[in-house]
Image (spheres, rainbow, N blue to C red):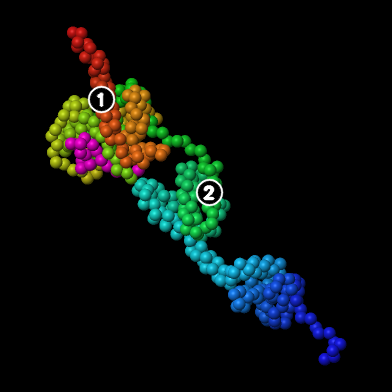
């Protein structure tokens, strides 16, 4: 070749237009980023970066053109060079990222939800059942198969909007999703919880469900008058109507009372409420012991069991017997249902807006505090409620049983006096004063 003939310059891949013109197989430098070139074959054009780390030369494949443009290839090459400068091999970093992506793809909402629920052994059975129901009915059908890192607020808001006509379901679904995604963050399956601080406006305001109860002394006196005049004395539901105001437990708890849970010598009833999952000891006033003793003595004889106040808790006979205290008339293996108890209240003439079986709990709280001046904390513990604040664990351990025993005996004495008034038309003190004047 003549020395004066110029040597043809190799084409460069310095732009998308330049890459489009490349047809001969080979490697073409961009001239923009050191080490960045495009590899041309008969079937593809691929961006690559030649680099050296720890004395070893490698080639990092960035991706195919035109899916990755010239500008994007340069940006990715600069990122890889920055990693190299910090001692990070971009090939190994890419492999680790791919493996992490595969792992994240495996963390579906259903998988995370099941692991989260399996670790919530601290919750009561009823609470766990509510979570399972929400998952099975609402969340898993919509989100179950999605990898949690792909779930956006749009997915969640659409689900909540679809439940909009059911405010309770919306509120519980929102809380459940947030807790599950919090768990996903802890697992490393997602970086952030997209549900945090969102969705409150999608939960329609719903009325707080109140259980109507008797709130005055006159109303409570009227109740006992109706029980004495209208309720059949040989029915388990009537016996429960007497004890429900005295104990102020939840209707389902009273209906499920068992003989083996009652300690007559210690005058207490010990059981585990399904709502809290914590063992509760209920002190039994002398009037309650009297009523239970009569029920136990006469159960199965179709006998009339009088009020709890005729014998004042002095019945001592306690035949050996187990099973339900309020066994069904139809079968001793089944206990009285809360629905039957509610129907017994309706038979006394109370509407659903006037009184429910659950309402006697608010009766104890209001009259016990306002009339008898019982300590509010003692009353709350008597109702099986957990106390808020820093002392809640201390209260949970001690349960203030001696104080609650005194309070419940005072409450039972108060109720006995009301029953006297309902039966005789005057208070016991008025009757005693009249007798003194004779």
- Residue that lies at the very extreme toward the right in this rendered image: 4
Asked if residue 385 lies left or right of residue 20, the reply is left
Residue 274 visible in the snapshot = no
Q: Which residue is mark 2?
A: 196
Query: Dot 1: within a 10 Å radius of its alpha carbon, few (fewer than 14), some, or many (20 or more) residues?
Result: some
Q: Which residue is mark 1?
A: 413
Q: Of residues 169 and 149, which is closer to you in this image? A: 149
What is the quadrant of the N terminus in the image? Answer: bottom right
Q: Of residues 226 and 427, which is closer to you in this image? A: 427
**Which residue lies at the image location 51% right of the left edge and 44% below the top edge?**
164
Asked if residue 216 lies left or right of residue 49, the reply is left
* Secondary structure under the numbered disc 1 in the rendered image: helix
* Secondary structure under the numbered disc 2 in the rendered image: loop
* Residue 118 drawn above or below residue 414: below
Query: Dot 2: within a 10 Å radius of its alpha carbon, few (fewer than 14), some, or many (20 or more) residues?
Result: some
Percent coordinates x, y for residue 175 in the rendering: 47, 47
Q: Which residues are magenta?
A: 259-276
């Amino acid at each position: 070749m003549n020395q004066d003939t110029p040597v043809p310059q190799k084409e460069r891949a310095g732009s998308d237009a330049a890459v489009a013109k490349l047809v001969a197989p080979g490697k073409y430098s961009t001239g923009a980023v050191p080490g960045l070139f495009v590899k041309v074959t008969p079937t593809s054009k691929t961006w690559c970066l030649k680099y050296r780390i720890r004395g070893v030369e490698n080639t990092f494949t960035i991706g195919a053109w035109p899916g990755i443009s010239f500008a994007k290839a340069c940006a990715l090459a600069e990122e890889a060079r920055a990693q190299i400068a910090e001692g990070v091999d971009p090939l190994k970093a890419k492999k680790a990222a791919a493996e992490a992506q595969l792992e994240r793809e495996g963390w579906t909402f259903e998988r995370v939800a099941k692991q989260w629920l399996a670790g919530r052994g601290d919750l009561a059975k009823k609470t766990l059942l509510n979570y399972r129901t929400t998952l099975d009915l609402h969340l898993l059908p919509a989100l179950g198969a999605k990898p949690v890192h792909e779930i956006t607020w749009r997915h969640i808001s659409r689900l909540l909007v679809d439940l909009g006509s059911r405010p309770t379901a919306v509120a519980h679904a929102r809380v459940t999703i947030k807790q599950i995604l919090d768990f996903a963050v802890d697992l490393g399956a997602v970086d952030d919880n997209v549900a945090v601080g969102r969705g409150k406006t999608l939960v329609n305001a719903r009325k707080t469900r109140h259980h109507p109860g008797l709130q005055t002394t006159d109303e409570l006196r009227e109740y006992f008058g109706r029980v004495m005049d209208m309720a059949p004395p040989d029915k388990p539901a009537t016996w429960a109507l007497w004890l429900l105001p005295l104990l102020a437990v939840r209707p389902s708890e009273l209906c499920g009372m068992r003989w083996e849970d009652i300690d007559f010598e210690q005058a207490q009833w010990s059981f585990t409420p399904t709502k809290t999952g914590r063992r509760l000891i209920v002190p039994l006033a002398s009037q309650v012991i009297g009523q239970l003793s009569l029920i136990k003595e006469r159960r199965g004889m179709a006998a009339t069991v009088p009020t709890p106040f005729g014998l004042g808790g002095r019945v001592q006979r306690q035949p050996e017997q187990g099973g339900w205290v309020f066994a069904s008339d139809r079968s001793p293996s089944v206990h009285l249902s809360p629905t039957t108890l509610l129907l017994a209240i309706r038979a006394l003439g109370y509407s659903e807006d006037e009184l429910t079986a659950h309402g006697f709990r608010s009766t104890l709280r209001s009259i016990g505090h306002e009339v008898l001046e019982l300590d509010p904390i003692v009353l709350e513990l008597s109702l099986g409620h957990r106390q808020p604040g820093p002392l809640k664990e201390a209260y949970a351990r001690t349960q203030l049983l001696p104080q609650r025993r005194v309070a419940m005996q005072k409450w039972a004495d108060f109720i006995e006096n009301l029953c006297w008034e309902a039966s005789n038309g005057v208070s016991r003190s008025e009757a005693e004063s009249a007798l003194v004047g004779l």
